[in-house]
Image: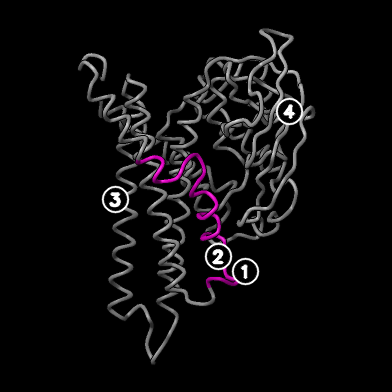
């Protein structure tokens, strides 16, 4: 057990260190600023670097040309991406990669194919017209992130999941607060390739998004500490005022509690046999990370003052990213309700079915 824990800790350190190839030095957000409010809002060269580093296949078995790591390593990577506000859709693509058929997976791992999952509820018929190769789909999905950089979509229909080529869809993007895009994706009798059950891919993406939020919040906290040390008022640094110190301590406590919760949740996600128990761990993590990130965002804005709402100061990039991701894959209140419902289901299970 100790050897496995030590090996995992080493893997996480290596993954975090490798993130520097993408994220650059702390505080260097020039690339992020340059990509905001552009289409598609991501960088092909950076995506290729991610593929070359093996990140897209982080959860894919080595026998399928992935690097065969686990969710703990994935969350460590996601946290580093959050600290640097990386806009490329690695979390979504890497979460779904282990469940893709071999031909789609091969091109996905090389970076040549970007397959974006659409987990939003479809408007319209939302059913496949037939079974097998002749299936088509008609409907639409709204608020799909990163749709403009996708070559294909995996859509959840009433008849299970299906793969659809992006070129067959109509994509209507809208700008988000952080400078990215959400799109309405419309399917008008488009060819749909039926796939298997991909429901756990969403759980992986939700858990990794919680880690991304933690990373963004942690970096915002560091920036806020630096600011209150150098900002002077009434002849002294505002960080010397007790009310500021108390607030900073509360921020740090919430971050560390959230980090501990995520570590516990990912351990349960990887070891629980019950799907409902695994989903409970995901909801607990997302609710906690969302609430903590919003708390850090509010306090950081207040402690920076008016400069926090200007576009020139980097703290605003973090608060806007947190506000954008807060609702992604479910709000904190949605996940608390899901946790409560699932906990009742799990509690009613025979003990041999829970673990």
Above or below: residue 307 compared with residue 15: below
Q: Are marks 2 and 1 in contact (CB under 8 Å)?
A: yes
Q: Are there few (<14), some (14-19), or many (20+) residues within 10 Å of tag 4? A: many
**Residue located beneath label 4 in the image:** 187
Q: Earlier in the sequence, mark 2 or mark 1?
A: 1
Q: Residues within 10 Å of mark 3 (few under 14, many from 20)?
A: some
Q: Secondary structure at mark 3?
A: helix
For mark 2, give the secondary structure.
helix
4 vs 3, front mark = 4
Relative image position of residue 332 (x, y in whole percent): 40, 46
Residue 354 as seen in the image, left or right of residue 338: left
The region drawn magenta spans 308-336
Q: Which residue is mark 2?
A: 316
1 or 4: tag closer to the N-terminus = 4
Name the secondary structure under disc 1.
loop
Q: Position of residue 93 (x, y in %)?
A: 59, 32
Instruction: Give the residue at x 48% y 45%.
Output: 17
Distance between the alpha carbons at the discs numbered 1 and 3: 31 Å
Q: Which mark is residue 311?
A: 1
Q: Position of residue 306 (x, y in %)?
A: 52, 77
| Mark with earlier residue (4, 3) | 4
- Quarter holding the C terminus is top left
**Residue 257 numbered mark, or none:** 3
Count all numbered tags in the image, as a single digit: 4
Colouring chosen for the image of the structure = one colour
The Cα atoms of the two marked residues, 2 and 1, are separated by 6 Å
**Front residue of 271 and 182:** 182
CB atoms of marks 2 and 4 within 8 Å: no
Disc 1 to disc 4, C-alpha distance: 37 Å
Of helix, strand and loop, which mostly describes the magenta segment? helix
């Amino acid at each position: 057990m100790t050897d496995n824990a030590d090996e995992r800790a080493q893997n996480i350190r290596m993954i975090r260190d490798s993130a520097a190839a993408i994220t650059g030095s702390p505080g260097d957000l020039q690339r992020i600023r340059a990509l905001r409010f552009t289409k598609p809002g991501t960088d092909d060269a950076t995506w290729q670097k991610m593929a070359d580093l093996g990140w897209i296949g982080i959860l894919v078995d080595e026998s399928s040309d992935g690097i065969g790591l686990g969710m703990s390593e994935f969350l460590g990577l996601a946290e580093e991406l959050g600290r640097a506000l990386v806009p490329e859709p690695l979390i979504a693509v890497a979460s779904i990669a282990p469940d893709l058929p071999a031909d789609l997976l091969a091109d996905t791992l090389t970076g040549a194919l970007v397959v974006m999952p659409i987990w939003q509820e479809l408007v319209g018929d939302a059913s496949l017209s037939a079974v097998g190769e002749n299936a088509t789909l008609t409907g639409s999905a709204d608020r799909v992130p990163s749709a403009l950089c996708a070559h294909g979509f995996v859509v959840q229909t009433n008849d299970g999941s299906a793969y659809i080529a992006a070129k067959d869809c109509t994509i209507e993007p809208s700008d988000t607060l952080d400078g990215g895009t959400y799109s309405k994706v419309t399917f008008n009798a488009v060819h749909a390739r039926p796939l298997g059950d991909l429901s756990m891919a969403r759980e992986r993406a939700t858990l990794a998004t919680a880690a991304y939020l933690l990373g963004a919040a942690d970096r915002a906290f560091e920036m806020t500490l630096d600011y209150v040390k150098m900002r002077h008022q009434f002849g002294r640094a505002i960080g010397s005022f007790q009310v500021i110190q108390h607030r900073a301590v509360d921020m740090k406590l919430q971050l560390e509690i959230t980090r501990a919760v995520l570590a516990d949740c990912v351990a349960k996600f990887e070891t629980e046999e019950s799907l409902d128990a695994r989903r409970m761990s995901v909801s607990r993590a997302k609710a906690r990370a969302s609430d903590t990130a919003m708390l850090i965002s509010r306090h950081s804005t207040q402690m920076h003052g008016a400069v926090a709402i200007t576009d020139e100061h980097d703290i605003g990039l973090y608060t806007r990213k947190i506000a954008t991701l807060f609702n992604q894959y479910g709000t904190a209140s949605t996940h608390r309700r899901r946790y409560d419902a699932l906990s009742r289901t799990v509690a009613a299970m025979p003990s041999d079915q829970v673990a």
